Each structure stands twice: as structure tokens, then as C-alpha cells.
Amino acid sequence: MSTQSPVEHELAELIVSSLNLEHTSAAAIAPEAPLFGGGLGLDSIDALELALAISKRYGFALRSDNPDNKRIFSSLRELSAHIEKARVA
């Protein structure tokens, strides 16, 4: 299991706080584990809440019609990489 980068940890903390995952530690979220389904067990409502929290924190919108959303939201690592790419652009 790989460890979180500082950017991934910051995002994991945002996930835990914005989705009220009281029984989950940000540090316990494996960077490559699935966020939806088997991993954290998030659902589509969680995705909407998370997209809103990311928009507020990082200042850009995650569009619901983006064909890459399945990949983007697949893991903490993928989501973090997408955010970093969007912040640089």
C-alpha cells in the first residue's frame, strides 16, 4: 500500500470533512483504493457533495458531463492528480 502525498492528504481531509465520514481517518484512505463501491463506499450524492467542496476549496468546477469522471473519481490519487492539473492550467 502506498502512502499519501501531502496534496493527497489534504484532499483526503476534505473528503472526510465534507462528507462527514466520522469513522474514517483521512490518513486511512489508501491513495489507490476505489472511492466508490468497494473502497469508501461513496455514492452519486457523495460525488456531488465532493465536487461542490472541491469547487469551493480549489476554485474550479468538476463538470458532471465530463466523460473522464469515472477515471477522475476512481481513487484519491486520480482525483488529486486531476485537481493539481486543473490548478496549474
Image (cartoon, rainbow, N blue to C red):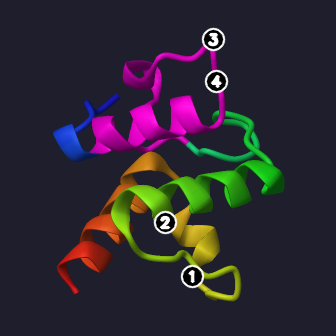
Q: Within 10 Å of the Cα at label 2, are there few (<14), some (14-19), or many (20+) other Cα atoms?
A: some
- Estimate the spatial distance between the alpha carbons at disc 1 and disc 2, rounded to whole Å: 17 Å
Image depth: mark 4 or mark 1 in front: 4
Label 2 amino acid?
Ser
Task: Please name the residue that numbered disc 2 is placed on.
Answer: 55
Image depth: mark 4 or mark 2 in front: 2
Q: Are marks 3 and 4 in contact (CB under 8 Å)?
A: yes
- Estimate the spatial distance between the alpha carbons at disc 3 and disc 4, rounded to whole Å: 6 Å
- Estimate the spatial distance between the alpha carbons at disc 1 and disc 3, rounded to whole Å: 30 Å
Task: Please name the residue that numbered disc 1 is placed on.
Answer: 68
Task: Please name the residue that numbered disc 4 is placed on.
Answer: 21
For mark 1, give the secondary structure.
Answer: loop
| First along the sequence among labels 1 and 3 | 3
Label 1 amino acid?
Asp
Residue 21 lies left or right of residue 71; in this view the side is right
Residue at x-position 28% and y-position 33% = 2
For mark 2, give the secondary structure.
Answer: helix
Label 4 amino acid?
Leu
- Estimate the spatial distance between the alpha carbons at disc 4 and disc 2, rounded to whole Å: 19 Å
Q: Within 10 Å of the Cα at label 4, are there few (<14), some (14-19), or many (20+) other Cα atoms?
A: few
Task: Please name the residue that numbered disc 3 is placed on.
Answer: 23
Q: Which residues are magenta?
A: 8-33
| First along the sequence among labels 1 and 2 | 2
